[in-house]
Image (cartoon, rainbow, N blue to C red):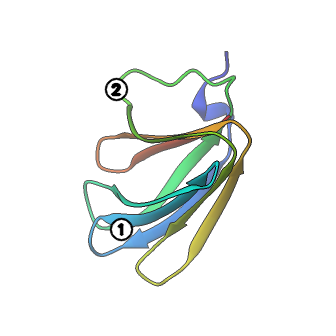
Amino acid sequence: MKQHYDYKKTYIGSSDGARLIVESCADGASRLEYLKFGQDGGYEAYVVDVNCEIPAGYVCALERVGCGWLKIFDDMGNMTKFTFNTGIRIYRRGEFGCIIQLM
């Protein structure tokens, strides 16, 4: 198994409210929710695949199963988009730790 440090970090947005808006759709079912952080600021996430071992201490903050897409919006309306075939998980730890696992 790979470590999350073996993968690239991707900028996913910034917020003065310590949260980003996540819109997702999997197998035709859509959802809108917040991805919360510990402090205001700019956020990056390691974008990993199923071959990555998620470290202890990370908690699954969001999971969607099926085929679909996920969009992350920040305070300025900037968007980061991911597509997935069987699912996606977003893990959080501490103030800024974030891992997005595409399946």
Q: Residue furthest right?
A: 85
Label 1 belongs to which residue? 41
Q: Position of residue 19 (x, y in %)?
A: 33, 64
- Residue 25 is drawn in which quadrant? bottom right
Outermost residue toward the top in this view: 1
Q: Earlier in the sequence, mark 2 or mark 1?
A: 1
- Amino acid type, mark 1: Gly
**Circles 2 and 1: CB distance less than 8 Å?**
no
Q: Quadrant of the N terminus?
A: top right
> What kind of element bears circle 1?
strand
In this view, 91 is above or below 34:
above
- Mark 1: give few (<14), some (14-19) or many (20+) Cα within 10 Å: some
- Mark 2 Cα-neighbour bin, 10 Å: few <14, some 14–19, many ≥20: few
Give the CA distance from mark 2 to mark 1: 21 Å
Where does label 2 land, which residue?
A: 57
> Residue sitting at 46 percent across and 23 percent down?
55
Secondary structure of the residue carrying numbered label 2: loop
Q: Which residue type does callout 2 highlight?
A: Gly
Res 10 quadrant in image:
bottom right
Viewer-side residue, 26 vs 21:
26
Query: Residue 18: percent from the left, percent from the top?
Result: 29, 65
